Image (cartoon, rainbow, N blue to C red):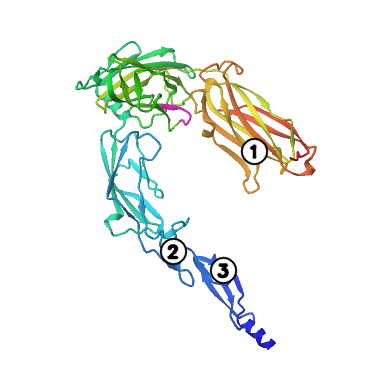
Amino acid sequence: MEACCVLKNALILLLSVTTVTGGLEMCKQQIKACEGDSCYKSIPCYHGDCNEAGICECDLCWLGDNCNEYVDNFLPEFNKEEDTAIVSDPWAAEAVYTAQAFDGDLGTTCPMEAIICDCAEIRYAITDGDVNKLFYINNLTGDVFVREASQVISGRTYNLTISAINSKGRKSPSPNSEMKLKVVIDDLHHHLAQVLLQNELTWLGDEIHSREKRSTEEDHYLTEFNFTLVSGEVETMEVGRRLDYRLEIMIPKTDGMDLTVEFFTKEIGNGNYTPVLALFNVMVEDKPEEVTFSKGDQPHIEMLLTDEIMTAYDRAIVTFGEVKNTNSDPVPIYMLFSVTQIKNPSTMFDTKYLVTAGAEYDKETYVWVGQSEVTVHNSTDEKSVEVDIIGPREIPLDSAGVYVMVTHCAVRSENFTFEITGPEEKDIVTVGNLGVKDFDKNYDPVPQSIYFYNTTKVGSDDDVIYTSATINLGIMTNVGNYREARDEGNVINVTFAIYALNNDSHLGMEIEFKTSVIVGKETLYSEPFKVKLVPRKDA
């Protein structure tokens, strides 16, 4: 009986072995009731993994003993024949529309919660209506973008055909594999450009002129605009100097009038334009009690960065929504903004550049545009940077020392890069986060969010040990005191961390790291900083 039982167990013995041959996984299993080295069979597993029993378990969308039978029961289709996208700002980086098809394999061949389902993946393409390549579509997400904002025409409708195909390039024969997308360009910027290009100038003074297109069907035509230079000299503009403007809007009595205002330094009709003048400090002063905005007490202000110099704003769009004035007499709304000249190698000095203020209101019935001519000049100054490092001189093991580089800058407008370089000795410390802490008041023209600026670290992501870190801030423009580095308002604060690894053999070591500031292509500051490694502080 005992021998019988042993034989019975031997008959069901199954030993699985997995090997890889030429990149192909082979599932090997011992044949039942067979002894010896040759008592096994190999099963190629093309699209799956071998389990403990030596069986090829297929990935989603694959079947068969060898997982080599592709299953795609459905092809992607749209659930609508056509749709419309209204584009109010062709220059914005956001998608103007998102196409969305569906594939029946998701929820049948693959579970709905599947993260990867190849047979249900969808690819998108613009297959008709875009001969001049003015638009493009993300083939994975279906997001549609304006590719050539300078070429699209305000008021025009572009009829695009969007197709959905599967990951293997197959398209359903059904008409639902395509949808029609009408893209309507209806933006304030192009309306203002149209007025500027088609109307004669009406001079209002030495520096400011305006153009307008109006109807007289409603009292809203009584809305008046007064665009003035508050401070600064338009004839003697230099890098880092500022001009302050004010736009006064006299709102007549109205039960509701939509209003959008735009300020810009972009050059109309020039798709290759790189800004010479940048906008900043756009604000709306407190409104009169008789006036209400549907957007709230303050309108929505959207600052738009130029594509070429990513730290310079060349457009600002102010959306008031519906404006109401219950007073029988017109009441004023005041808007303020500032302009500065920034570093731009393509600047043509002793040349006039334009600052434009424009408004569109009452459902596009009325358009007003005012412009200021600014003559820009070259300037040369010595650049200087002085740095104070604030932080601990000792770092406990398994802890981090957090530091601030208080950087005083006498630089008008230039590219700034900060670098932290760890010691030559390896595996003692790691360079931690490097980022912007804040900007002093003279740097109002640049993006203020600390999350806007990204750090690059050198080292091992696997071990989380980094030997250096670099952050390139881009063009930083100072609109205040750029004569002496330690003048008020000139500080850029950058923070970083040095983490001491938990190794008792490092106790008492004095290590040295280096902090550097590169302005343009010139290193204006580079100094070592020494710290001592001390015992770990237990909680």
Q: Which residues are magenta?
A: 309-314
Contact flag, marks 3 and 2 (Cβ < 8 Å): no
Q: Amino acid at mark 3?
A: Asn
**Residue, disc 2:** 61
Q: Nearer the viewer, residue 108 or 232?
A: 108
Q: Amino acid at mark 2?
A: Cys
Q: Nearer the viewer, residue 179 or 260?
A: 260
Circle nearer the viewer, 2 or 1? 2
**Residue, disc 3:** 51
Spatial CA span between label 3 and label 1: 42 Å
Disc number for residue 432 = 1
Count neighbours of disc 2 (C-alpha within 10 A) and say few if under 14, some if 14 to 19, many if 20 or more: many
Answer with left or right where residue 308 lies relative to residue 384. left
Count neighbours of disc 1 (C-alpha within 10 A) and say few if under 14, some if 14 to 19, many if 20 or more: many
Q: Position of residue 508 (x, y in %)?
A: 80, 37
Q: Residue at x 52, y 23 (%)?
A: 443
In primary-sequence order, the first of circles 2 and 1 is 2
Snapshot quadrant of residue 458: top right
Which residue is at the far top?
206
Q: Is residue 490 above or below residue 54?
A: above
Which residue is at the far left?
217
